[in-house]
Image (tube, grey):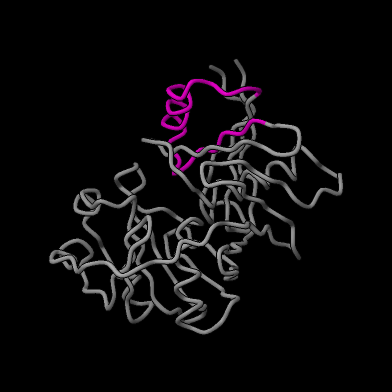
Amino acid sequence: MNIRYYVIDAFSERVFGGNPAGVCFLDNWLEDRVLQRVAAENNLSETAFLVQRADHYELRWFTPKMEIDLCGHATLASAFAIFNFFYGDKNVRRVEFETKSGRLSVEKQKGLLMMDFPSRKPVPCPPLSNIVDILGLPPSLILKSRDLMAVYEDEQQIRKLTPDMAKIAALDFLGVIVTAKGESSDFVSRFFAPKVGVPEDPVTGSAHSTLVPYWSGRLGKKKLHALQLSERGGELFCEDKGERVAIGGRAAAYLSGTIRI
C-alpha cells in the first residue's frame, strides 16, 4: 500500500520554522492501530490523515502516542497541501474538514491561511499547590479548558521557564499553556504536552482556541497578533468571533513522498 505523504512547516513562511506536520492522504480509512503506528513512525507532534469526500475531507490527527480531538498546525498543513499539490492553479480558496471537533474550514485570505475553529474560553481553575514545582515560576493566574493555562506577567518569564515534564504528564489535562503579554506582539505562549508524546510543541494552533478569547477580553481587542516562543518559533494572526475563533498563518513545504506499508 502506498500513501501520499507531505511534511509541511506550519505557522512559518520558511522551512525549518514553525511546526512540522505530517499529512497523509488515504483512499479509505485504515484501522486505527495502523494510523497510530504511522504517526509513531513519523514521530512528529501530529500526523494528519485525510479521506476525500464529495464536498469536504474527513480529517483525523494523531500524536506519536494517541489520537486527539483538535489540532491547529496539522489542519493548516493539510489545507496548504490540498491547495498547493491537489488544486494547483485552480481558483479554490476554501476547503472544509469534518473532524472530531465538528466542521472546520480553512480559507485563503490576503496571503494567509485562516482557520475557523471553535472557541474554548478558559474558566477559573482551583489553585495547584505544586505549580511552582511543575513550571519553575509562580504564575499570576491559573485557568483551564482542555488544557491548563498559566498566565505570567511578562514575556521574559515565558522564555525562561523550564517545566518538569514528568509532573506535567501527571496532570489531568492534555497539556499546559503558558502565556504572557508580548513585547512585539499582543501575546506570547509556549505549550507542553509530554503525556501525548510532545514535550514542547513548536506551535500549537489548538491552544489558541483558548488563548484568543482570554487575550481578546483582557486587551479589549478582537484581532490579535501572537508569537509562540519555542526554539523553532511561530507566528499567528487571530480574531475573536465569539463562539468561534479565526487562527491564521503561513506554511512552507519541506517534504513530499510516499509511505509504503
Residue at image location 48% in from the left, 79% down from the top: 217
Residue at image location 34% in from the left, 71% down from the top: 158
| Quadrant in the picture for residue 22 | top right
Image quarter in which the N terminus is found: top right
- For this rendering, which residue is in front, 29 or 101? 101
Q: Residue furthest left?
A: 129
Give the left or right position of residue 163, taking residue 245 as reference.
Answer: left
Q: Residue furthest right?
A: 90
| Residue 36 belongs to the span the image colors magenta | yes
37 to 106, vertically: above or below: above
> Residue 202, position in %: x, y?
45, 55
| Quadrant in the picture for residue 254 | top right
| Quadrant in the picture for residue 249 | bottom right
> Residue 20, position in %: x, y?
52, 47
233 to 43, vertically: above or below: below
Magenta-highlighted residues: 27-51
Residue at image location 24% in from the left, 60% down from the top: 163
